[in-house]
Image (spheres, grey):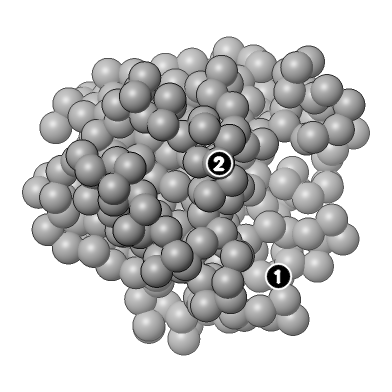
Amino acid sequence: MKIYSWNVNGIRAVEKKEMLAPFIQKHSPDVLCIQETKAQEDQVADMFAELYPAYEQYWHSAERKGYSSTAIFTKIPPLEVILGIPDDLKKKYKLDDAYGDTTKEGRVLTLEFEHFYLSTVYTPNAKDDLSRIPMRQQWDPAYLQYMQRLEKEKPVVFCGDFNVAHTEIDLARPKPNMGKKGFTEEERAGFDAMIGAGYVDSLRYFHPKTPDLYTWWSHWGGARERNVGWRIDYVMVSGALTSLLKNAKIHPDVYGSDHCPVSIDISL
C-alpha cells in the first residue's frame, strides 16, 4: 500500500500547472493525503472526481474560502470519515487565537481503514514573529492526544505538513535558524512528544543520519535548485507498524508546490 502526502499550496493551481496528473500517473498512490488545498469541496469535487475517477475523494474545507484545508484521495474505500479534532479536545485545549479558530480551517482529516487509521494534518504556522507559538503549544498536544485515542482501537498513520524541522539534520542551515519559526524549542518539543509517545518518523527509520533530505524550499535565491531546504513534511506511524514498512521516501523531483510529496510503502 503506497501512502503519499503532499502540501500542494493550492490544488487548483497545481492542476492548472498540469503537474498533478503526471505525478498521479507516475506514482499511482493508493492513498494521497493533501494539505493546503485552498479550496471548498463544492468548488472542486466534481472536477477532480471526473479527472481522477480511480479515487474516492474526501474533503475538509475551511470556512474561509481559499484558505488552508485538507483532502484525501483513496483507491481503498474507508470504513469511516472523521473531520477535524474531537469536540472534547477542542474544549480542553485553546485552539483559537487572534488569527482565527484553527478548528474551522479544515486542518485535520482522518479515515478509518480495516487495519489502521490514517490522518492528515496541516499544522498551524508559528508566524515570523512567533506570535502563534502559544497556539502551537496547544495544538501539538491536542493532535497527539487525538492520535493516541485512535491508537487504542487500531494502529495509526498520520502525515502532513507539521511546520517544524525536528533536528538539525532536517534543515540546511540550522545554526542561523535556531529559535526562528519552524525551528524553535517549543515546536521541536511538540515533535519530541510524538516520538516519546512511541510514534516513528518513517523517513528517519530508514535514513537516520542521511542529510539533505528536505521537503520545503523558499521561493527566494534559487533555494530549491541549491537544495537549501527544510524537512517539515512527515509520515509518522505507530511503533507496531514499523515491521510492515517497506520504504519511506521524499520526492523532490515532483514540482508544482513549494513542498514536495513524501511517502511510505507499507504491507497491510
The image quadrant that residue 170 belongs to is top right
**For the N terminus, which image quadrant?**
top left
At x 36%, y 19%, the residue is 26
Above/below status of 243 relative to 49: above
Q: Position of residue 87 (x, y in %)?
A: 37, 82
> Disc 1 vs disc 2: which is toward the camera?
2
Above/below status of 73 relative to 58: above
At x 58%, y 35%, the residue is 17
> Secondary structure beneath disc 2?
helix
Q: Indicate the amino acid at tag 2.
A: Lys
Q: Position of residue 89 (x, y in %)?
A: 42, 78
Q: Indicate the amino acid at tag 1.
A: Pro
Q: Which residue is mark 2?
A: 16
At x 34%, y 69%, the residue is 83
| Disc 1 from disc 2: Cα separation | 37 Å
Q: Pick whichever of labels 1 and 2 is earlier in the sequence.
A: 2
Q: Which residue is mark 1?
A: 134
